[in-house]
Image: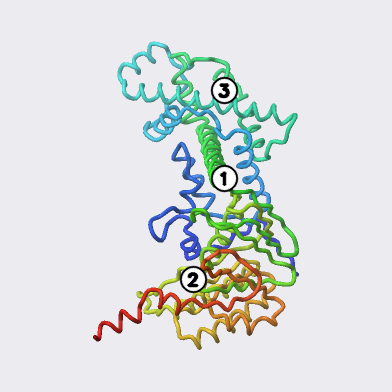
Amino acid sequence: MESYNMENMKFEVDSQTKKDLEIFNTVSNGTSVFDLFDHTKCFGGKKKIHSFLASPSTDLDEITERKEAIAFFQKHCPAGMSVDKNSLDFTEYYLRHANYPTKSPSRYMAFEKFLLDKLSTNNDYYLIKNGVGAAIDLLKTLHLFSQTLIDRSKNEYIPKLLLRNSNEVIRILSEPDYADIIKHKKVKTTETTTYDYLFRYADKNYLRFFLDVIYEYDAFRSIAKAAEMYDFSYPEMVSDNENCLEIEGLFHPFVENAVANDVSFGASSNLLFVSGPNMAGKSTFLKALGVSVYLAHAGFPVPASKLKLSILSGLSTTINISDNLNSGYSHFYAEVMRIKDVANKLQQNNNMMVLFDELFRGTNVKDAYDGTLSVVSAFAKIKTSFFVISSHIVEVARELQSNENIKFCYFDIKEEDGHPVYTYKLKEGVTDIRLGMYIIKKEGLIELINNISL
């Protein structure tokens, strides 16, 4: 198999895929993937989580560093830094609403002029005084946390991202202008304008950096909390010549008491064909798989007990596609155009995960059979990508069973007292179970219609 260099390459994912997987928005106003992880204490942390999820990565180092940082927060400091929220809120307000910083450091000003300024601009002074005080409180907290991590690194492993941040924080706060801030317990009144000038003019990028680190740590703590709450695990991401996907205990986090399943792709197969009747669990399985692959490339924990995955160049799903009335497309034509769009993406990023749920559901049975057979056969030849395609047309599966590139699985259904029971358990092979007429009879549909004419 050909090797692809994906360092710094953008992970290909479109709005349809994000919609299918409910990354940010929900189909039925329920919980989104973003909502699962958002336990942040500040708006900056919330924005960080959004930015992480909005841009999955193909950079193994970036993914690994973020994953390790989140796992560290889960294991060693689930409460995160003890940041005072009032200090954080006021610092943000101070930076947003003060019109301009003090024009020159107070050490170059006469004390009498300082008092005059204080009396003549009382509101501005209040904002500056409390803003400086709040910012200093944050710096002291960040300094203590950073120094603690550096000290611990002498005897234990500290994730690279956290250690890099800590070293930079300590370096900046060791400069002469900041040394007194860390040492002194309280800022003198005469020093207020000095620090205001420093924070909002001379070294304003430093304060933004400090806040960005605090936001990032708030996001890491929040994501780690979700991992603990929902029993997520941290994926093993690899960069190999051979594509690899092995999942144990995969489940969908939106499903209460979800049944977990295992799935893997070997070197001999790159396409998984999933059969089973309606409501057996096919769509939920595809969504769970898509969410896990998506989160893994964002450096997040995943809804599975174990995941080993090679770095992919992108993810594309077709699960909840709808008619495009504005373009005059029927459901079937929308499906065809979506497959064409995926094929075009594969020409540029032929190391993707592609998920299709019930191909060609918008046309007649004959066309659905022929179309599914043709498309699946063609995709199976693209050995550099993974494909998972579900269908309740089991005749297609029978026709494809001689293809060595295709692996077949189905969702098992048991019979109890003459009634089908959904197990939501994935098994190898192809199923012959059909439940369409059973459901029609169970609901008394034909009798109801017949009684209308009586």
Tell me residue 331's x, y (percent): 42, 78
According to the picture, the residue beneath numbered tag 2 turns out to be 419
Mark linked to residue 227: 1
* 63 relative position to 106: left or right: right
* 90 relative position to 253: left or right: left
Q: Earlier in the sequence, mark 1 or mark 3?
A: 3
Q: Residue lying furthest bottom in this view? A: 366
**As drawn, 300 above or below 427:** above
Q: Please name the amino acid that badge 2 sits on.
A: His
Q: Secondary structure at mark 1?
A: helix
Q: Are marks 1 and 3 in contact (CB under 8 Å)?
A: no
Q: Please name the amino acid that badge 3 sits on.
A: Tyr
Depth check: 252 or 111 in front? 252
- Splitting the image into 4 quarters, where does residue 362 fall? bottom left
* Image quarter hosting the N terminus: bottom right
Residue at figure coordinates x 39%, y 35% from the top left: 96
Q: Secondary structure at mark 2?
A: strand
**As drawn, 330 above or below 419:** below
Q: How many neighbours does mark 1 have within 10 angstroms: few (below 14), some (14-19), or many (20 or more)?
A: many
Q: Are marks 2 and 1 in contact (CB under 8 Å)?
A: no
Tell me residue 248's x, y (percent): 65, 57
Mark linked to residue 178: 3
Residue at figure coordinates x 53%, y 28% from the top left: 82
* 294 relative position to 270: left or right: left
